[in-house]
Amino acid sequence: MIDLGSFGKSIRAIVVTHYGVAATYMISLAATNLISSGIFPTISEISPMNRSLFEGFLERRGFSRSDYDIIQGLPRFAKYPLLIYSVGYDLRPNISELERLSHQITLVVTHVGKSLRLVLKSGIYELKRVEGDIFLLEDGWTKERKYLEINNFEVKIVNYRERKSERDALKVLLDAMSEQGELSTKDAIFVLQGKLNISREEARRMLYSLAQNGKLRLLHGKVELS
């Protein structure tokens, strides 16, 4: 189960993302979780993170610079817990060093982390932007997914429903037509509604938008390819 209060603490994890600011938020969250438990972390800054964001995140929660250490690169020796920020720098050449430090590492935020999973014996999560400040966090093992709102020095789980794109709708209709042949507009709306898990009104809007954009034609109550 994805629990933000456990990141960096009871959950040992690799978070894979290409978004540097979101990565800084995840490191900040982990550091906050640890300090709140009376554990002072070391942050290994392999690639530059947003220091002002990190410091502001912790200051908002009453923590100061004396509550954590920030070092450049991987240490030769490290005390537990070690948080690693490496977005934009490939950690794979450092496998032997990471293996040596594996018992000290609680969280790695990187853009190429999947090959590190076995070395660190960690869970792996993928963090992708959906839109704006909304990100999707997916557990690589269980495939559990949570939407996060990441902004204003906060990381929180939110209820969010992804808007299906017209590309999704067109693919669904093309697949249905290849299987069933000709579709009526009524059938097309029904197919979109069921396959995309959207309302009838949204399905109708998507169908007519596809027609207006020249992706297909609606003639005499039938759907035809352009």
Image (spheres, rainbow, N blue to C red):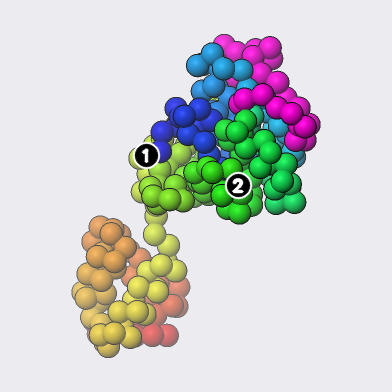
- Left or right, residue 2 beside residue 203: right
Q: Which mark is residue 1?
A: 1
Q: Nearer the viewer, residue 146 or 77?
A: 77
Residue located at (77% from left, 35% from top): 73
Query: What is the x, y in percent for residue 207?
Result: 33, 70
Quadrant of the drawing holding the N terminus: top left
Residue located at (41% from left, 67% from top): 168
Magenta run includes residue 2: no
Which element type, helix, strand or loop, lies under badge 2? helix
Sooner in the amino-acid sequence: mark 1 or mark 2? 1
Q: Residue furthest bottom?
A: 181
Query: What is the x, y in percent for residue 202?
Result: 30, 59
* In the image, residue 155 above or below residue 38: below
Q: CA distance from mark 1 to mark 2?
A: 22 Å
Residue, disc 2: 119
Quadrant of the drawing holding the C terminus: bottom left
- Answer whether residue 98 is visible to the viewer in this image: yes
Query: What is the x, y in percent for residue 178?
Result: 33, 86
Q: Which amino acid lies under the numbered mark 2 shown in the image of this protein? A: Val
Q: Which amino acid lies under the numbered mark 1 shown in the image of this protein? A: Met
Q: Which residues are magenta?
A: 56-81
Magenta run includes residue 76: yes
* In the image, residue 99 above or below residue 173: above
